[in-house]
Image (cartoon, helix red, strand yellow):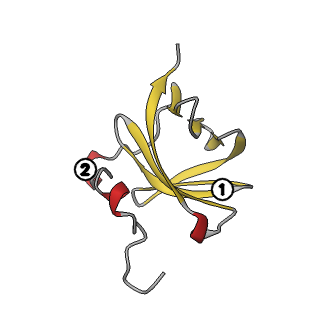
């Protein structure tokens, strides 16, 4: 990444990414982000996360959501209806995927 370049380099994801005033300060804990046919993310109040079957941790630092598992490093944001993530498998930025995961409540 070059100096001064935005970490959010995907124009398609940036077009739907929530502005700072629309972002949630913490995830919802009463369901999943994602659907059965794509990545799924479930947050817990103890700062743990399940990302596509892998357990890891999450935090929000200066408005940016950060997730980490043994296999994935992700950053993004949350709004009332979805999680927006850029995820790299084991930190390999060249293989980064962009995810827009709608929230699905339990039950």
Q: Identify the residue at the far right of this view.
A: 70
- Which tag, 2 or 1, sits closer to the chain's start? 2
Left or right of 89? Residue 66 is left
Q: Nearer the viewer, residue 25 or 54?
A: 54
Question: Residue 64, located in which quarter of the rendered image?
Answer: bottom left
- Read off the residue under disc 1: 72
Q: Nearer the viewer, residue 48 or 38?
A: 38
Mark 2 or mark 1, whichever is nearer to me: 1
In the figure, 1 relative to 45: above or below?
A: below
For disc 2, the neighbor class at 10 Å (few under 14, some 14 to 19, many from 20) is: few
**Disc 2 on helix, strand or loop?**
helix
Question: Residue 40, located in which quarter of the rendered image?
Answer: top right
For marks 2 and 1, give the CA distance: 27 Å
Q: Position of residue 86 (x, y in %)?
A: 50, 57
Task: Give the residue displayed 33% in from the left and 52% down from the top.
Answer: 17
Q: Which mark is residue 21?
A: 2
Q: Position of residue 50 (x, y in %)?
A: 65, 39
Question: Residue 8, located in which quarter of the rendered image?
Answer: bottom left
Q: Position of residue 57 (x, y in %)?
A: 64, 49
Q: Position of residue 18 (x, y in %)?
A: 30, 50
For disc 1, the neighbor class at 10 Å (few under 14, some 14 to 19, many from 20) is: some
Task: Give the residue displayed 44% in from the left and 85% down from the top.
Answer: 2
Task: Give the residue displayed 36% in from the left and 34% down from the top.
Answer: 81
Q: Nearer the viewer, residue 3 or 36?
A: 36
In the figure, 11 relative to 98: above or below?
A: below
How many labels were placed on the picture?
A: 2
């Amino acid at each position: 990444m070059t100096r001064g370049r935005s970490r959010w380099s995907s124009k398609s994801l940036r077009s739907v990414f929530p502005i700072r005033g629309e972002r949630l300060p913490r995830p919802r804990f009463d369901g999943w982000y994602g659907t059965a046919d794509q990545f799924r993310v479930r947050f817990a109040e103890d700062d743990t996360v399940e990302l596509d079957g892998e357990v890891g941790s999450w935090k929000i630092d200066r408005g940016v959501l950060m997730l980490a598992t043994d296999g994935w490093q992700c950053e993004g944001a949350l709004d009332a209806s979805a999680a927006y993530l850029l995820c790299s498998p084991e930190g390999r930025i060249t293989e980064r995927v962009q995810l827009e995961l709608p929230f699905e409540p339990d039950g």
